[in-house]
Image: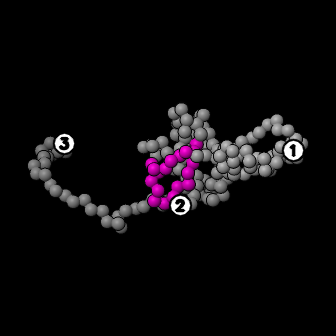
Amino acid sequence: MESGLQKLSIQEKEDAEFVISTEDIQREEINYELCLLGKPVGERAINAEALERTLLSMWRPKRGVYIKLMIDNNLYIIQFYHHFDMKKMLAGGSWSFNKCILLVHQWKEGENPADVDFINTDIWVQFHGLPLGFTSEMLAKNIGNLMGTYLEYDTVHRHSSWNS
């Protein structure tokens, strides 16, 4: 067989047209309602497999999640398979790994992931040592708006006005 290949040569340049019909294109099924883009931000390098294992162990999605690294720009596609799992993940954040914070963005159809600016994240802030009477939701709202945009007050962990 090798002797046959040795005699093979291309003598003329052939102009061939490469045509792809729309029927030939198989589009990836992306449910944008359940899809996030994630970007770890920090000074350390991230091991993609370790990040995925850690996030899955923290999130524990009931219906599963698919995490894929887009190598070009250190972005991750995070595809959930149920609204409950995604809402639980978003409510439980912000998420960090290896001293890097994972910034997330709700991916919209037609949006180029490389064009997304990851500049904001929601964080929980906890205050200690406040004097009695300074544990109201209104005070938390005022402080939160000073820091950025107030989102929510955690009433679950506030047992009474005597709480330290």
Q: Does the magenta run of residues contain 65?
A: no
Question: Is residue 50 visible in the rendered structure shown here?
Answer: no
The quadrant the C terminus occupies is: top right
Residues in magenta, as a range: 102-119
Front disc: 2 or 3 = 2
Question: Is residue 120 visible in the rendered structure shown here?
Answer: yes
Q: Residue at x 49, y 45 (%)?
A: 75
The part of the image, by quadrant, that contains residue 17 is bottom left
Give the SS element for disc 1. loop
Q: Residue at x 78, y 47 (%)?
A: 139
Q: Which residue is mark 1?
A: 133
Q: Earlier in the sequence, mark 3 or mark 1?
A: 3
Q: Which residue is mark 3?
A: 2
Say few, some or many: other residues with alpha carbon within 10 Å of mark 3 (under 14 / 14 to 19 / 20 or more).
few
Q: CA distance from mark 2 to mark 1?
A: 47 Å
The answer to whether marks 2 and 3 mark residues whose Cβ atoms lie closer than 8 Å is: no
Q: Which residue is mark 2?
A: 31
Q: Position of residue 8 (x, y in %)?
A: 14, 46
Say few, some or many: other residues with alpha carbon within 10 Å of mark 2 (under 14 / 14 to 19 / 20 or more).
some
